[in-house]
Image (cartoon, rainbow, N blue to C red):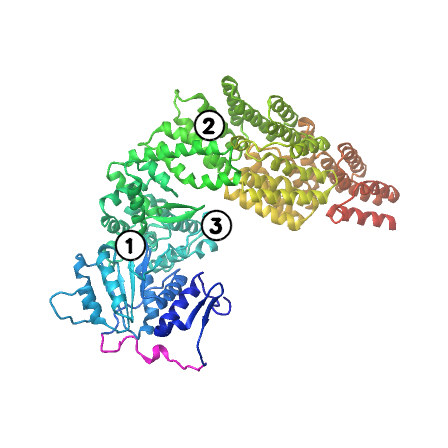
Amino acid sequence: MERVWPGASVEENTLQVHISALRKALGADRGLLKTASGRGYRLTGDWSRQEVISTSSDGVDPAVAPDGWSASNLPLSGVDLIGRAAAVQYVGNLLSAYRAVTLTGPGGIGKTRLALEVARAALPAFHGAGWLVELAPLSDPGLVPSAVARIIGLRLSGDEASAESVARAIGARQFLLVFDNCEHVVDAAAAMAEAIVRLCPRATVLTTSREILRIDGEQIYRVAPLDVPSSDQSESDELLRCSASALFLARMRASNSAFVPDGSDVSAIATICRKLDGIPLAIEFAAARAATLGVAQVASALNDRFGLLVSGRRTALPRHQTLRATFDWSYDLLPEGEAAMLCRLAVFAGHFTLDAVTAVIDDLPEHRLLDGIANLVAKSLIVAELRNGTASYRLLDTIRHYGLEKLRDRGELRQVARRHADYCLTLCVRAEAESETRTDAEWLAVYAGHLDNMRAAVEWGFSPDGDTEIGVALTVGIVPFWFRLSLMKECRGRIEQALAAAGAETDARVIMRLRAALAAALLYSEKGATPEVAEAWANVLAIAERLDDGEHRLWARWGLWNHRLNHGAFQESLLMAQRFSDVATNPGDLAIGDRMAGISLHFLGEQAAARQHLESVLRRRYEAAPRSRMIRLQYDQKLAARAYLPRILWLQGFPDQAMRAAHRVVRDALADGHALSICLALSQAACSVALLAGDVAAADRFVAMLRERAAAYALDLWRAEGRCHEGILRVMRGDVAVGLRMFRAGADELLDTNTGMNHAGFLIGMAGALIVAGDCTQALVLVSGMLARSDRAEERWFRPELLRLSGECRLCAGELEAAEASFRQSLDCAQRQETPSWALRTAIGLAGLLRTTGRAEEARTVLGHVLGQFTEGFETADLRRGRSLIGLTQVE
C-alpha cells in the first residue's frame, strides 16, 4: 500500500477495480491477465519495458472533441468540493474500470457535484468528449433519447428517437456521458444507459439518481453524508476538522468574510451538522441562514428546519431552493403505498428491524413490508445496515422530520405513535426478562441500540397528543437502560416528569420504582445527597414494607446506607450495612452487605476489618446478581469492592500491590464500559493511590481519564472529585497557586453536591498544599477544624495524617514542642490503626525535627522502626525520602 498508493485512501476492492480497468484496456487480449486462485493476479505473455513520454491529454484539447463532435458541455467548477477527495478518487477508479457507474443517495447529498468533479477529472482520458445531460427538466420519459441526441449533436433519421437509435448513432466513438437526476424518469434513463453500454463499446455512462438503474454491469456508489462531529468531541479544532463543519464555515464565510467562530459558535455549528445528518445541501441552507440570524439561533430552531432552511441559490433548480422542496421532489415520485410506509416508519427515531416494522405497521402482510422497505432503500430514503448479523434500518434525521410532518398531515400520527410506544413497552419487558439469562455484554449488544426509539416513545407519551399512562410505564421500563449506560441526568429529568404526571390511580409499585430510581439518579446529579434523597429512600422503604417487596426493601436500605456514608456519618452507615445484611437472603445480597460494611469500616479507620469484608466479596461463589439488582445498586459488586481495596493496601504498607490492584480494576472497569464503575475505579482507586504513592505520571493519566468520563456523562460528583485530584497533581508538580485554585473549586463543588464521603480527604490534600505554599496559618485552621470533625463523626481513616499536618504547621511556626507532640500522637494513631504508610510520613517529619534538635540517634531509631515494616514499594516517593533521611542520620 505504501509503495503503490502512497497517501491515497484505498478501499478493500481497489485492486479488483484496477484489474478490471486493465482487462478493459487490453480488450481482446484480456486473457493475458489471469487470476491465480488464493494468490492474486498474474500477467502472462512476453513483455518489454518502454519509456513513454506523454503530454497532457495526449496533446488533445479537452474542450475540442475529435471526429467533428461538439465540445464538452461539462461546466467549470464554481466552488471547492469539500470533504469528497476520497470519493472522487474512488469513483474515478470505478469509472476507469467499468462502463456504467451510478451515484445514488438521498436528495441534497451532493451526487451532482461529485459526478461533475469526477467527470471533469476523467475528461482527458476521453479526449475531451464528455457531455452532461440534465434530465430534471423532463416531465415525459419518452423525451430522454431525444434529449441525449440533442446534447451530443446527433442527427437522427426518422420521426422519433429511441434509446437504440441513439446508441447506434453513437457507435464506436469514445466519450463520457453524465446523466444527472434520473429518478423521475428512471425506466427511460435505464433503457438509454443499457443501450449505450450494449451497443457502444467505447462509451461510458455516469449517472446520478436517488434510485439505482438496475442494468447489467452497473456499479453503484452510495454517496455518504459528510463527516459530522461526534457528540463526545469537545475541542474546537476537532469539531471544525470534520468535513460537514468545514463546509458550513466555507459557506458562512462566503456570506460574511469576517466571521470567526468563538467557542459557543463552534459548539452550535457541531450541533447543526449533527442534526442535519451531514447533508451538504441542508448545511449550505443553514450556513446561509446563520449569516443573517446567527449560528446559535439556527441551531435552536432546527426542529422547524423545513420552515427555516429556505435560502437556496437563485440559480439552483427549484427543488434545491428550499429544503422542503428537495424532499417534496422525492416524496412526490413515490407510489402511494411506499409514501404511506415512509411516513409510518418516521416514528422510529433510531435503528429498527423488520420485527419492529411488523409491530408498528400491522395492516400489511410481511411480503408487502419487505417489498416496500427494499424499494425505499433502493430510492435512498432508508439506510440499510447489518448490525450483529441482523439487517436493520434507519432514516436520516431530516428525512424522519419530513416523514413525521407528512404523517401528521395524513391524520395518522397518534395511531402510529401509539403502536410504536406499545412496541417499545413490550421491548422493555422482554429486556428485563432476558437480563437474567444474557451476559452483560450480550444484553447491551441486543438492547442498547433501542434507546433512541424508547426516548422517542416517552417523548410522545408525555406530549399533548400522547398517552400519559404509556409515558409513565415506559419511563419505568427504560430505567435499567439509563442506569446501565450511566445517563443519570437524563434519567432524573424523565422520572421527575413521570412522577409529576402520575395520578392517584397509578399503581403503588410503579411509584415505588420511580422514586427509587430518582433517589439513585439524584446522587450523581448536581443536587447530590440532599435531604430529599433521604426522604425518597424512606418513602421507598415504607412502600416496599407495605407491599412486601424484598428487592426494593434492600434497595432502600442500600440507599439509606449510601446517604449516611455521603454525609460522613460512618458509624451510622455501618449500622445500616448491618441491617441490610440482616434481611439479605441470597449469596449475592450478602456480598453486597459485605461491601457496604467494608467501605464503612475503611472510613472509620478499621482497615484490617475493612479489607476482610471486601476480600470476602471477592471470595464468595455466587452467580452474578440479576441485572435489575445490579442496576439497582449501580455497580458490579466485585468491581466496586476492588475499587476500595487499593487505598487500603497502600495504608497497610503495600504500595506496589496497591498500584497493581488499581491498574487492574481500572482495566476491568474500562472493559465493562459502565461509566459509573469507571469513575469509581478511577477516583477511589487509581487517582487516589497514584497521588499517595507520588506516581505523577500515572496520576496525570488517571486524572485526565476521570475528568473526561465525568464530563462526557454529566456526572457532577465525579467531575468535582476530578478537579480536586487535578489540584493535588498541580501542587505536586510545583504549580501551587493554580493547584490551590482548582482544589478550592473542586471542594466547593463537592459541598454543592452534598457528598462528603471523600470531601475530608481532599481537604487534607488542600492543607498539605497550603503548607507547601507557606501558608501554615491557614493550613492549621483547616486541620484543626478537620480534627474536630473527625472526633464528632468518628471519621478516623485519615486521623494520623491530620495529626502529622498539625505537627508540620506547628513546626513551621517554630513551636517545636507542640510539633513533636502532634507527630508522636500521629505515630501512635497510625500504629493503632496498623497503617504503616501514614506512620512513615509522620516518622519522616518527626525524624527531621529530632535531627535539628540534636537527637540523631533517636531519629534513626524512630525512622528505622517504621521503615522495617515495609517489604515493598522502595521506589515510591515516601520510601525514597525515608531511606535518604535515615542515611543522612547515620552519617551524622
User: In this view, which residue lies farthest toward the top?
Assistant: 546
Q: Amino acid at mark 2?
A: Leu
> Does label 2 or label 1 sit earlier along the sequence?
1
Q: Which residue shows up at 54% across the image and 41% down it? A: 675
Q: Specify which label sits upstream in the sequence, 3 or 1.
A: 1
- Secondary structure category for the residue under label 1: loop
State the residue lying farthest toward the left.
Answer: 159
Magenta segment main secondary structure: loop
Determine if the magenta segment contains residue 55.
Answer: yes
Between the residue at mark 3 and the residue at mark 1, the CA separation in whole angstroms equals 35 Å
Q: Can you say whether 95 is above or below 598 in the image? A: below
Identified by mark 3, the residue type is Gln
Disc 3 secondary structure class: loop
Q: CA distance from mark 3 to mark 2?
A: 32 Å
Counting from the top left corner in percent of width and height, residue 476 is at 44, 30
Most foreground residue, 707 or 679: 679
Q: Which residue is mark 2?
A: 514
Mark 3 or 1: in front is 1
Q: Which mark is residue 233?
A: 3
Q: Position of residue 798 (x, y in %)?
A: 70, 35
Count up the numbered dots.
3
Q: From the viewer's perspective, is 839 left or right of 687?
A: right
